[in-house]
Amino acid sequence: MATHQPPPDAERLIRWIMLAIVGWGAIHAVGAWTLNHDARRPLVVLACVFGFLGFWLAMLAARRRRLAGRE
């Protein structure tokens, strides 16, 4: 049975994608703040971005554990 190994630079690529998502979220947070200068608006945007990234990291960790258990 063939094992599905990620490419050697996959971790670095995922880190760059996550950094880009944080930057994208920061831009949207600034835009939300400039709408009416309410500090809660950018906090909600950033909480959603970090919640998404946390969920993604949890799913990657679960996948890594599952694949490590097969070896």
Image (spheres, rainbow, N blue to C red):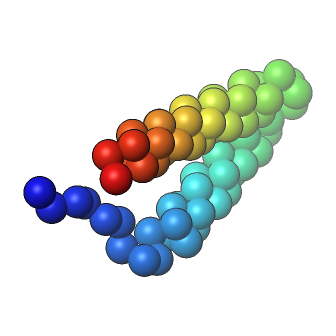
- Image vertical order of residue 23 relative to residue 31, above or below: below
Q: Can residue 56 be seen in this view?
A: no
Up the image or down, 26 lies above or below 54; here it is: below
> Which residue of the protein is positioned furthest toward the front in this rendering?
71
Residue 10 in the image, given as x and y percentages of width and height = 44, 69
Closer-to-camera residue (15/36): 15
Residue 14 in sight from this viewpoint: yes
The answer to whether residue 56 is left or right of residue 27 is left
What is the tally of numbered marks visible in this picture?
0
58 sits to left or right of 66: right
Q: Please give the name of the residue rendered at 59% of the width and 63% of the height, measured from the top-left corner.
A: 15
Residue at the far bottom in the pictured view:
8
Residue pictured at 34% horizontal, 53% vertical: 71
Q: In this view, does 41 lie above or below 12?
A: above
Closest to the observer: 23 or 4? 4
Task: Tell me the quarter of the picture where residue 2 sits.
Answer: bottom left
Foreground: 66 or 30?
Answer: 66
Describe residue 69's horizontal placement relative to residue 48 as left or right. Answer: left
Q: Where is residue 30 in the image (x, y as percent from the top left)?
A: 76, 45
Q: Residue at horizontal 63%, vertical 30%? A: 51
Q: Where is residue 62 in the image (x, y as percent from the top left)?
A: 47, 37
Corner quadrant of residue 32: top right
Viewport quadrant of the N terminus: bottom left
User: Residue at left 52%, top 43%?
Assistant: 61
